[in-house]
Image: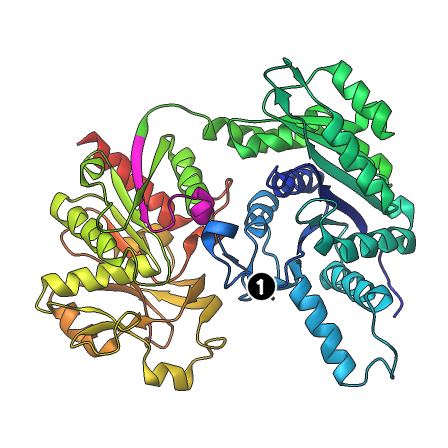
Amino acid sequence: MERIFLTKYIIITGGVVSSIGKGITSASMGRILRSYGLKVAAIKIDPYLNWDSGTLNPYQHGEVFVTHDGMETDLDLGHYERFLDVELDGLANITTGKVYESVIAKEREGGYLGECVQVIPHITNRIKEMIRENSESADYDVVLVELGGTVGDIESQPFLEALRQLRNEEGRENVMFVHVTFIPYLNAAGEFKTKPTQHSTKELRSVGINPDVIVCRSQEPIDDALRGKIAHFCDVDYEAVVNTPDAGTIYEVPLVLEEHNIGEFIVKRIGLDIEPDSSKLDEWREIVKSLKITEPTVNIGIVGKYVELEDSYISIRESLLHAAASIGVKANIKFLSSDVEELDRDAMSELNGILIPGGFGERGFEGKLDAVEYAIENNVPLFGICLGMQCMVTQFARLNGYPGANSSEFDDNLEFPVIDMMEEQKKIKNMGGTMRLGSYDCKIVEGTKTFEAYGVIDIEERHRHRYEFNNDFRQDLQDKGLIISGTSPDDFLVEIVEFPNHPWAIGCQFHPEFKSRPNRPHPLFKSFLEAINEFSKN
């Protein structure tokens, strides 16, 4: 098929250690290019065999980010959306599972006409096709492609080969490689060490890929002499060695990269027909400035079951920071375990607001109910998201005539299953298997705190859950005071609830954190922070 446009590609690889910030680096470069007026997309390649991130343990992989079209993806897509201020499709997360499944399906259908199906060319060709499908979906000027893991991983080899081929097929003038490495500091020697970066770059070059830019992550800034050494031994231009030391906020990284003139380097390297202008990041500089304020401070507790790994709630954390900055306060976020034996009730007394996030499974549920009851008794602003909303409904029911109310997710033989997977819903709703995933419309009830937050009746939000508010209890709980402030357009599914006689207590079945942006905080999070700020003054 003849292509009628030309997309440029920036490939981001990693070396030395994992989790050094390839996603933030990719998103930051994208933010710079977006500020120049370019149309930018981003892809995350995950070499694991899982088809998607939906079944991965949050302790191992962090948050599952859900796209508007219902794909459960790697958390880096959240960084991409927040930095680029775009909505990405599920196509933007490529996994080994997806690649091999599509190749095997084609082989079973006879699509290879009896050929012996091999990693090269069939797997590598499919990888390139999937990358180009993203490019062609909206005629992007630039597509960032981040390869997860580190160079040298066995599972990454087919992807590296495919990316090498992509460069040759698209033309070297249209594809550039950025290698992100770690520069360790040895206290005993009193100096930074570049040898890991040298070896990582050598490993990349051994598969036929020469990096155009090396981004050196470090805890503290490295000096110009060290940059020169890396340039010399890794065979790149001096100005292509960029240092990104640990920053106060991840949103500073685009500004750090631009201080190294990375935008101008990219524009020249891949021949973009624009004039780079760092002043176009002025709005972003103001956002960073607002995110770095130190007072006044409000204390917000996230009561969850995966709090040992903060990345499990990364979109919620960032949404709270966005909203706090927008009203001129600093959010001091505290993570509290919801395991009922571990729930720190003394720590809750120091909180100005409580947020109960989503999750699956019974562990920690009763602790979350205790947190809901604490918020009710002490008029602390309370925000429940997904399972958090179900906790609010369950505790309200227990306090209003339904002792033992619970979710049928945890017990099939309940007297009061106020949260349930309803048979009617299974028959008439497309759940994407057993789950409701992706964006769905919602209708807001006027005169509610939710309507005050949104200011409109019709909204669209992203979901990731199996169980719903049980309509068998709907009218009676409303009669007892529960406010239903948002439903599906046909009024069948309860989407948002509020507590009566409370300063601010809202629970939503969807995940608003996936749509918050540093330049445009989500309305519910902003309203929550405004309530917290007011509560903290009393």
The quadrant of the picture occupied by the C terminus is top left
Question: Residue 480 placed where, x, y %?
Answer: 11, 66
The residue that disc 1 covers is 52
- The answer to whether residue 104 shows anywhere in this view is yes
| Residue at (65% x, 66% y) in the render | 97
Question: Residue 106 placed where, x, y %?
Answer: 76, 79
- Name the image quarter holding residue 417: bottom left
Q: Secondary structure at mark 1?
A: loop
Question: Residue 361 placed where, x, y %?
Answer: 34, 63
**Coloring scheme of the render?**
rainbow
Q: Residues within 10 Å of mark 1 (few under 14, many from 20)?
A: many
- Name the image quarter holding residue 402: bottom left
Question: Residue 89 placed where, x, y %?
Answer: 62, 61
Residue 70 vs residue 86, the one in the foreground: 70
| Residue at (61% x, 38% y) in the render | 21
The quadrant of the picture occupied by the N terminus is bottom right
View extreme (left): residue: 401
The relative height of residue 148 versus residue 19 in the rendered view (above or below) is below
| Residue at (28% x, 69% y) in the render | 410
Total marks shown come to 1
Q: Which residues are magenta?
A: 298-314
- Residue 274: say if magenta: no
Tag 1: amino acid: Asp
The relative height of residue 508 versus residue 264 in the rendered view (above or below) is below
- The answer to whether residue 447 shows anywhere in this view is no
| Residue at (13% x, 64% y) in the render | 398
Residue 446 vs residue 209, the one in the foreground: 209
